[in-house]
Image (cartoon, rainbow, N blue to C red):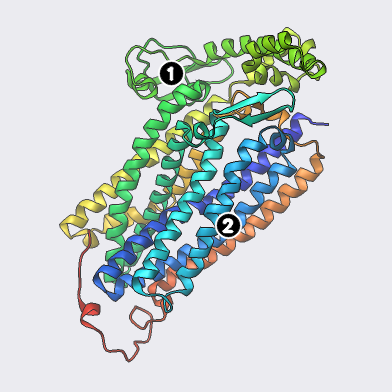
């Protein structure tokens, strides 16, 4: 029997595995393009130091890539084990981009990763650069197809419910592929990954500069990371604004909870900078607002209202009532599928079918739902406000701190004095965890803000789960946490080990901590250039 506790534990298991997985993916997305930049400079200039940079940062990329693949595999299996009804209900749509991701992107990515590491002495400079570019393309294509699938969960376009098969079926492939929510989410997410990769390289390079080791190597790495990081964080902020606009159109509930907007404000709505949120009384005790800002972000206009939580809840209550009718008509259609008059009646209310299914949490027979049950279902249609509100603000705050860091770093890079600014280098080192925290919070806002739906407005989370024993979920969750923690410890050990070794881990004899080899340096090796 499916219970609320089973659903909560299944959600927790998927959240834990996803959060673990997302520790590794952003760094993979970000570092791969930095490798492309470094190797392109090497191919263009012939300077050995740029090849060494590509190989060294590529070593750290490879460690992270392996852990990302390992933690990602189990997530797809959970759709069949913990979320079987979800898979049956929307598998024709959700499964397609995931299958394409495996066939098109992952095979390309993993093949190129192998050639990247083992092709240095077997391929020409240009051929190896092509491999690195294709590795980056494969990595980003992989993210694209996964985020198309996730974007459809947020905004289910291009699909229709078939009452005969009891499944959602694809009717417009292009609508799914070019779903605005999916496209915004893709660019926003990969840009966030670029920020993670940039700040990782910036922080480690700053650490080397503080310790006065491998200075020329670290300077070049710092310069590349500062420039790429500034472009990336600007993209994150701009696309974050665009995502806010998309959310305002597709998921007004998420937007209202992110802003702790309990009541519909006159247009253009203000932005709550900070607020004291009272969940019990469903109000803010106090708030600091920026006039007009939310209306401009959420509607791109001065005269369009953004509905508040209370108004959304009342609208959802009406849709739940209509959904009861939709569920009843669906049951009749299942018995008399050729009744065209009945089908016409169902078509009028089928868009509210998912809201009727919200009542399954309280009664097996939706037609017997009481007014109290309907009200509870309406209350459930709004996620908790405080976690959404503060997660979003911490994420945005960290984003602007990183913007300031990259901007300052690039400024002093242009001036040629960044290596002398101890305070800047220490700031870069301290900020190392920031992009991961922001990325995890971004995932939380996107996924928790969709609740109580797995497919927004279509399929409630409560009815999506598998009918399995809670004990099975407990044991598998404990197994995942234990196994993933071991992998995380291995990742941290290897990363710290090679960060401590630095480029000396390449064994070239050219870096601090190595015994110099009997090699006559070339003019290219001795040349010092600055790349901005």
In this rendering, does residue 303 appear at all?
yes
**Rendered image quadrant of residue 270:** top left
**Rendered image quadrant of residue 505:** bottom left
Residue 421 location in percent, x, y? 23, 58
Residue displayed at 45% across by 11% down:
264
Count residues near mark 1 (Cα–Cα under 10 Å), then give few for <14, some for 14-19, many for 20+. few
Quadrant into which the C terminus falls: bottom left
User: Vertical placement of 461 versus 524: above or below?
Assistant: above
Nearest the eye: 285 or 425: 425
Outermost residue toward the left in this view? 415
Quadrant into which the N terminus falls: top right
> Which one is earlier in the sequence, the residue at label 1 or at label 2?
2
Nearest the eye: 384 or 268: 268
Residue 451 location in percent, x, y? 60, 28
Proximity of marks 1 and 2: CB atoms separated by less than 8 Å: no
Residue displayed at 40% across by 70% down:
56
Asked whether, in this view, residue 2 is left or right of residue 79, the answer is right
User: Vertical placement of 334 versus 407: above or below?
Assistant: above
Residue 390 location in percent, x, y? 48, 31
Gap in Å between the C-alphas at discs 1 and 2? 45 Å
Asked whether, in this view, residue 343 is left or right of residue 227, the answer is right
Residue displayed at 38% across by 62% down:
35
Q: For the residue labelled by badge 1, is the local secondary structure a helix, a strand or a loop?
A: strand
Residue picked out by circle 1: 286
């Amino acid at each position: 029997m499916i219970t609320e506790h089973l659903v909560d534990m299944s959600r927790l298991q998927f959240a834990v595995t996803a959060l673990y997985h997302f520790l590794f993916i952003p760094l993979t997305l970000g570092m791969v393009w930095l490798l492309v930049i470094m190797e392109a400079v090497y191919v263009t200039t012939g300077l050995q130091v740029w090849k060494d940079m590509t190989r060294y940062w590529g070593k750290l990329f490879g460690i992270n890539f392996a852990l990302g693949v390992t933690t990602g595999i189990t997530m797809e299996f959970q759709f069949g084990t913990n979320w079987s009804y979800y898979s049956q209900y929307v598998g024709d749509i959700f499964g397609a981009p995931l299958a394409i991701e495996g066939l098109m992107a992952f095979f390309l990515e993993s093949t190129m990763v192998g050639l990247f590491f083992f092709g240095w002495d077997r391929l020409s400079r240009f051929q190896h650069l092509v491999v690195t570019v294709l590795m980056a393309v494969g990595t980003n294509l992989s993210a694209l197809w996964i985020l198309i699938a996730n974007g459809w969960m947020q905004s289910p376009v291009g699909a229709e419910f078939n009452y005969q098969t009891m499944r959602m079926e694809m009717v417009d492939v292009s609508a799914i592929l070019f779903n605005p929510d999916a496209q915004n989410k893709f660019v926003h997410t990969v840009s966030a990954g670029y920020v993670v990769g940039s700040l990782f390289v910036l922080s480690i390079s700053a650490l080397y500069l503080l310790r006065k080791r491998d200075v020329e190597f670290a300077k070049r790495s710092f310069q590349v990371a500062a420039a790429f990081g500034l472009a990336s964080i600007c993209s994150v902020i701009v696309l974050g604004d665009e995502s806010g606009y998309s959310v305002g159109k597709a998921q007004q509930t998420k937007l209202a909870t992110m802003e702790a907007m309990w009541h519909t404000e006159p247009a253009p709505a203000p932005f709550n900078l900070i607020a004291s949120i009272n969940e019990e009384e469903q109000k803010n005790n106090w708030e600091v607002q920026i006039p007009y800002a939310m209306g401009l972000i959420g509607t791109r206009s001065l005269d369009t209202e953004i509905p508040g939580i209370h108004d959304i809840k009342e609208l959802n209550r009406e849709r739940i009532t209509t959904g009861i009718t939709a569920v009843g008509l669906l049951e009749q259609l299942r018995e008399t599928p050729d009744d065209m008059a009945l089908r016409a009646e169902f078509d009028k209310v089928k868009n509210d079918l998912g809201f009727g299914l919200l009542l399954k949490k309280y009664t097996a027979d939706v037609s017997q739902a009481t007014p109290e049950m309907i009200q509870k279902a309406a209350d459930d249609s709004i996620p908790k406000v405080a976690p959404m509100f503060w997660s979003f603000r911490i994420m945005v705050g960290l984003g602007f701190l990183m913007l300031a860091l990259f901007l300052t770093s690039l400024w002093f890079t242009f001036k040629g004095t960044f290596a002398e600014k101890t305070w800047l280098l220490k700031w870069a080192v301290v900020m190392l965890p920031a992009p991961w925290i922001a990325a995890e919070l971004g995932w939380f806002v996107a996924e928790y803000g969709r609740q109580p739906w797995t497919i927004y407005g279509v399929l409630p989370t409560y009815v999506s789960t598998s009918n399995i024993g809670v004990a099975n979920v407990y044991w598998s969750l404990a197994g995942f946490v234990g196994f993933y923690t071991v992998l995380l410890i291995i990742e941290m050990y290897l990363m710290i080990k090679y960060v401590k070794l630095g480029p000396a881990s390449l064994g070239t004899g050219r870096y601090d901590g190595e015994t110099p080899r009997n090699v006559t340096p070339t003019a290219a090796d001795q040349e010092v250039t600055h790349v901005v």
